[in-house]
Image: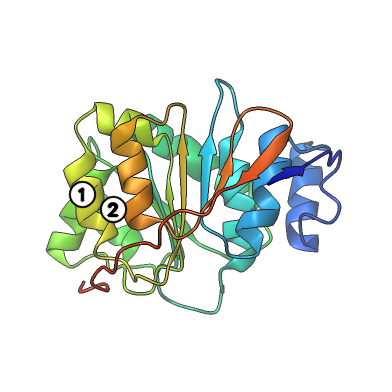
Amino acid sequence: MALESRTTSFSGLVDARIQRALQEIGWAQPTPIEARVIPSLTIGRDLVGQTEPGSRTTAAFGIPMLQRLDPRSKAVQGLVLTPTRDQARRVVADLTKLGAHTRLRIVAVYGGEPIARQMSRLREKPHIVVGTPARVLEHLGKGTLTLRSVHMLVLDDADRMLKMGLRPEVEQILVRTPSTRQTALFSAGLPDPIRAMIGRYLRNPIWVTPGPSTELYQAAPRRAQRTAAS
C-alpha cells in the first residue's frame, strides 16, 4: 500500500518550538523526504529512508527526535550514528538550530578530537549524542556514555558506514540500546547487508523511497536482542 504525500508547509508537522526555529532558519517548506518521514517518525514508527544526493535528512529525523524527547530527563535519549566526523558536526549544527527552543542538549563525539574534551561535554548530561561508531564505542567502554535510556536511534548514511567496514561497530552499539527503541535508517542504496540489518534491528518499518509515495512494508518481526547493559 502506498501513501501519497503532497505536504507543502510545515504546518501540522511540527510543534510551536520547532516552528519558531524553522522561521528563524528560513525554512518555509519541507522537502519531499521531510514531508514523508516526519509524520511516521513522530508517531513512533521504525523507518527506512532511501535517500537521494542533496536530501535534507537531518531535519527529517531531527524534528521528530527533538519533539519527542523530554528535556527534563538527564539521560541520553537520542543517538545518531554517522560515518564521519564532518557529518557528525553537520548533524549537530542542524539539530542545534532546529532545537534552539527545546532546551535539549546535543553533543558530538568523534575521532580526531581529544576524548577528554568530549568526556567533559558528556558530563553535562546531553539528551542527544551524535557520533561516529568507533568513538561511541570508546565512550561506552570507558563508561562515559550510557545508552540504556535511548528512545530513538538513527543510522544516517548507513550504506557508507558499511562500505567503511563499520558494520561490527554499528551492531555492537545497537545491541547495547533498549530493544524497545525506535530506529530509523537512512541509506542511498539498499544492498543485501543493509537489508539484513533492517530485518534484524527494525520492527515493521515504513519504507520511504524516491518517488511520489511512501510504501508501507511489513517486515519480519525484529529478532529479540539484549537490552542495554551499559
Residue 195: % across, % down: 36, 40
Q: Amino acid at mark 1?
A: Ile
Count of numbered badges drawn on the protein: 2
Q: Is residue 61 left or right of residue 220?
A: right
- Judge the density around disc 2: few (<14), some (14-19), many (≥20) Cα neighbours within 10 Å: some
* Residue 131 seen by the camera: no
Viewer-proximal residue among 5 and 85: 5
Residue at the far top in the pictured view: 53
- Looking at the rendered structure, the secondary structure element under dot 2 is helix
As drawn, 84 above or below 118: above
The residue that disc 2 covers is 118
Q: Is residue 41 left or right of residue 168?
A: right
Q: Are marks 1 and 2 in contact (CB under 8 Å)?
A: yes
Q: Amino acid at mark 2?
A: Gln
- Judge the density around disc 1: few (<14), some (14-19), many (≥20) Cα neighbours within 10 Å: some
As drawn, 19 above or below 181: above
As drawn, 230 above or below 93: below
The residue that disc 1 covers is 115
As drawn, 111 above or below 17: above
